Image: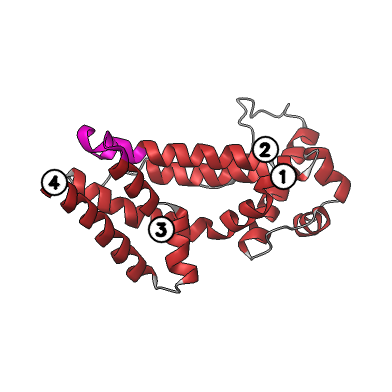
């Protein structure tokens, strides 16, 4: 879905009376957020307001007119990323059994992590000084944990040690360690995490 769908306020008034200034304001706001997304995606973890303004082809005053500070701009960017991840979460599983779905979560999250890796790096740089990013991160973590809880059988979801271990293996931190620090390929990373989760489930079943 077009990112602008999440950025622009939806209006029921599509007639000729729609105020042109308001439309231009909405367009500027969307361009600013898109510019921020593009700059971070390209590897700039902390683009300046001046750089965002230049990429969006708007004046610096326009950036601050729409966003009182850079934290609110990061908040808008977070909303777009969250919408993309939620659309993935709503996609039906291919696997028909719970174990297959748990292992499928590795592939699904790996796909998502590959897309959001530049943004996660940027967020970690600014989280200590940004309430918006801290709230965004907590919301994503809680949502991911809830998905895992729904996929697992109730008795396994209630096993704290097992649940926390699987949740850790499915985390962005585990994925980043294998992909970045250990320089593993995408397929190898997926197989290793799936193997570790399978071993945990086998151990629990044998206990």
How many marks can you see? 4
Q: CA distance from mark 2 to mark 3?
A: 27 Å
- Which percent across, then down, holds residue 202? 16, 53
Magenta extent: 147-160
Instruction: Check disc 1 and report the residue beneath it.
Output: 129
Residue 5 visible (yes or no): no
Q: What label does residue 50 carry, if any? A: none
User: Which callout, 1 or 3, points to the residue nearer the camera?
Assistant: 1
Q: What label does residue 111 carry, if any? A: 3
Which label's residue is closer to the chain start, 2 or 4? 2
Q: CA distance from mark 2 to mark 4?
A: 43 Å
Q: Residues within 10 Å of mark 1 (few under 14, many from 20)?
A: few
Q: Residue at x 68, y 48 (%)?
A: 33
Q: CA distance from mark 3 to mark 4?
A: 33 Å
Predominant secondary structure, magenta span = helix
Instruction: State yes or no: residue 21 in magenta.
Output: no
User: Which callout, 2 or 4, points to the residue nearer the camera?
Assistant: 4
Q: CA distance from mark 2 to mark 1?
A: 7 Å
Q: What label does residue 131 carry, if any? A: 2
Q: Which quadrant of the structure image shows residue 153?
A: top left
User: Which callout, 3 or 4, points to the residue nearer the camera?
Assistant: 4
Instruction: Check disc 4 and report the residue beneath it.
Output: 207
User: Which callout, 2 or 3, points to the residue nearer the camera?
Assistant: 2
Which label's residue is closer to the chain start, 3 or 4? 3
Outermost residue, left side: 206
Q: What SS does tag 4 mark?
A: loop
Q: Residue at x 68, y 46 (%)?
A: 128
Q: In front here: 205 or 89? A: 205
Q: What SS does tag 2 mark?
A: helix
Q: CA distance from mark 1 to mark 3?
A: 29 Å
Q: Residues within 10 Å of mark 3 (few under 14, many from 20)?
A: some
């Amino acid at each position: 879905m077009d990112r602008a769908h999440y950025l622009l306020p939806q209006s029921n008034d599509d007639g000729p009376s729609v105020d042109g200034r308001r439309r231009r304001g909405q367009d500027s706001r969307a361009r600013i957020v898109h510019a921020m997304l593009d700059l971070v995606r390209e590897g700039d973890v902390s683009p300046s307001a001046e750089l965002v303004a230049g990429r969006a082809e708007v004046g610096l005053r326009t950036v601050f007119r729409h966003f009182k500070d850079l934290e609110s701009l990061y908040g808008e960017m977070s909303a777009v990323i969250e919408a993309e991840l939620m659309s993935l979460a709503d996609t039906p599983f291919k696997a028909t059994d719970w174990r297959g779905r748990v292992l499928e979560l590795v592939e699904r999250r790996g796909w998502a992590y590959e897309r959001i890796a530049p943004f996660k790096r940027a967020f970690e740089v600014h989280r200590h000084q940004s309430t918006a990013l801290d709230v965004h991160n907590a919301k994503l973590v809680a949502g991911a944990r809830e998905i895992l809880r729904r996929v697992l059988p109730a008795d396994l979801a209630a096993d704290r040690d097992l649940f926390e271990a699987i949740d850790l293996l499915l985390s962005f931190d585990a994925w980043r360690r294998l992909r970045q620090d250990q320089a593993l390929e995408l397929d190898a990373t997926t197989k290793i995490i799936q193997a570790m989760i399978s071993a945990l489930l086998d151990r629990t079943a044998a206990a």
